[in-house]
Image (tube, helix red, strand yellow):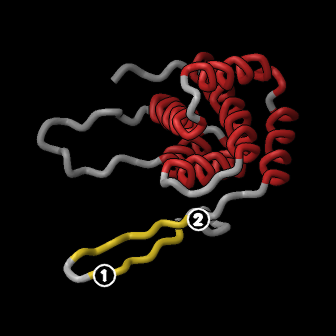
Amino acid sequence: FTSTGCPIWSLTSLGSALIVFISVEVPSVPEIEEQRRVLEEKAPATANAALEVERDFLQQDDDIVIALFKTRVEIERLLRTIVGKSTTLPPGKENIRMAGLPQLFDIFVAQNPKYKYLRKSLRYVNQVCSAAIHAQQVSEQQAREVLALGSKIIATLDDFANEHPAPVQ
């Protein structure tokens, strides 16, 4: 990902095969730590819930990549629920592309501008989780910091979802 959060990719043709290489720019540990401090300052009430989420993800699986994957999926699930976007496609509409994590977050912030402080943290979580999921090297410290950061985002979104139940579809 570039500094704007866009993926860096390249295409290589090898005979008749087309190979796609994805390279994800990963934030440094100090950048991630700074965003954790921002979230702790902006949403101190979610601290205990965030620790619980982080502990649950780490206890469920010893593989940190799986914990990062679960973190990203849970953030996306919460955002999809909050903004009222479906998690399933109607029959016959399987070729429709569903909104991804950045688009869901943009919709959420457009409806709830007070949460724009989560933007950089969410970008870092998405970058590191995507890098890990695509088998790029992520340090243990980066992974643990992002798990903590992602857990704070999850706790914040979960708190929001509990205070603002989504309309029944």
Which quarter of the figure is the C terminus placed in?
top left
Say which residue appears at 55% left-offset and 25% top-offset: 61
Pinpoint residue 163: horizontal percent, then vertical percent: 62, 17
Q: Residues within 10 Å of mark 1 (few under 14, many from 20)?
A: few
Say which residue appears at 71% left-offset and 31% top-offset: 152
Left or right of residue 38, residue 114 in this image:
left
Left or right of residue 81, residue 123 in this image:
right
Does the rendering let one see residue 7?
yes
The relative height of residue 66 versus residue 11 in the rendered view (above or below) is above
Residue 144 disc label: none
Pinpoint residue 71: horizontal percent, then vertical percent: 57, 34
Left or right of residue 15, residue 166 in this image:
right
CB under 8 Å between discs 1 and 2: no
Which amino acid is tagged 1? Ser
Left or right of residue 80, residue 93 in this image:
left
Which quarter of the figure is the N terminus placed in?
bottom right
Q: Residues within 10 Å of mark 2 (few under 14, many from 20)?
A: many
- In the rendered structure, which disc, 1 or 2, sits on the residue that comes first in sequence? 2
Say which residue appears at 85% left-offset and 47% top-offset: 34
Residue highlighted by disc 2: 1
Residue highlighted by disc 1: 13
Q: 101 and 73: which one is in front?
A: 73
